[in-house]
Image (cartoon, helix red, strand yellow):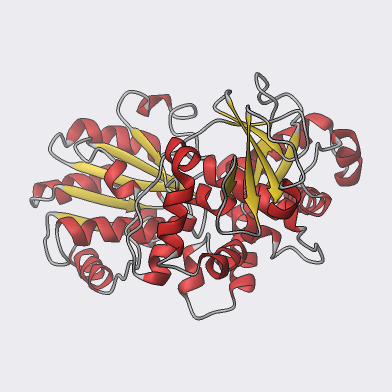
Amino acid sequence: MESFFKTHTYLVEHMTASVRRTLMDEIDWNDRLIGIKGSRGIGKTTFLLQYAKENFGPRDRRCLYVNMNNFYFQGRGIADFASDFAAQGGKVLLIDQIFKKPDWSNELRTCYNQCPNLKIVFTGSSVMRLKEENPELNDIVKSYNLRGFSFREYVNLQTGNNFPVLSLNDIIRRHAEIAAEITSKADIATMFGEYLHHGFYPFFLEHRNFEENLLKTMNMMTEVDILFIKQIELKYLTKIKKLFYLLAVEGPKAPNISNLAQEIETSRATVMNYIKYLSDARLINIMYHPGDDFPKKPSKVMMHNPNLMYTIYPYIADTQEVMETFLVNALWKDHVVNQGKQDACYIIDNMRKLKVVDYAKSLKLRNNADTTYAVYNTTEGGNGRVPLWMFGMTY
């Protein structure tokens, strides 16, 4: 136990979180069992350590961070370890990469029953289905999703400002005055271009090649988050990776499932399952028309965020496609986003139509009362035209 406390102290003392994630204030920390899911590289470990530092400090033995990568847990169960920790006065156990431990869900249930005064916060992959696939946790776990940096978080990080989260209604109704205030304090045009290229994943802060780092992360998403968690045999990895590549280079469009099945030499049903796994891993977003959902054929498949588009070679990212991907990714967290009937048109929450278009081209379009233009290549809007970057301020 002492070695874990020593590691905990070192990690918390040396933890540097440049941005305080909004999820920190969205979680009900009174719950006894909290699961935090997120894609690889998104900052889940930092999030746990930030919580420990804010609420306990590095040397408070009531809180302890452990990682299931530690070989110690190959011979020791989580429930036994948690009981020992609680017996020594422990109150909060932070468990990173819970899925690395076999039978982890039953272990957590045992912890919950045996240690009524212990709170457990654990992290897992976005591929995990905490409640659907683990009924023993269904009535006790509260699940949250940690996303990559929003454009708002990126701007605050780069400028030292503290621009607040904006609601979609505020953006639509008050975009002119809000945009004027923000652009007076930040070089939005420059930072928006940077964010699209490398701002979603926190590891852009590391002094390493971003594209190479992201490529490694993408490979880990398929090799661990999909194969390991979904218990898929290793021999099928090349098929999943090839499918992802084909979807990426085809760009945002309705996938031809039959052609994809022939390309990777598998069945249509398997292609659809693989597409769902890639979506769960936050590598792609699956778009549907209103009223449709999986397992129906998607109306469009697009990359999960623009950073991925700039990393897959020899694919050349099309500006229009990048901007649409940004909008979908920005609104996905708190809104239902569906494919509209027209190109570049999206339906938000089954009621609001947003059309992504270059600002200069939008001036040639007739204003439509039921459509809002999300315009790029401008920092300001007006007359039914909302600067696209502002939708990145919603979380």
Q: Is residue 255 above or below residue 81?
A: above
Q: Nearer the viewer, residue 87 or 248?
A: 248
Q: In front: 73, or 54?
A: 54
Q: Residue at x 27, y 74 (%)?
A: 14
Of the 4 image quadrants, the one containing the N terminus is bottom left
Instruction: Give percent across and percent down for residue 326.
Output: 61, 51
Q: In the depicted view, which residue is nearer to us: 347 or 250?
A: 347
The residue at the far bottom in this view is 207
Residue 15 picture location, percent across and down = 29, 70
Residue 235 seen by the camera: no
Question: Is 237 on the left-hand or right-hand side of 388?
Answer: right
Task: Looking at the picture, tell me which residue is in the foreground, 128 or 49.
Answer: 49
**Could you say where residue 289 lies in the image, as x and y percent from the top left?**
70, 26
Residue 105 drawn at (x, y percent): 39, 36
Residue 251 seen by the camera: yes
Q: Residue at x 8, y 50 (%)?
A: 89
Q: Residue furthest top?
A: 291
In this rendering, position of residue 288 left or right of residue 4: right
Question: Does residue 118 appear left or right of residue 19 in this picture?
Answer: left
Q: Is residue 14 above or below residue 5?
A: below
Q: Quadrant of residue 369?
A: top right
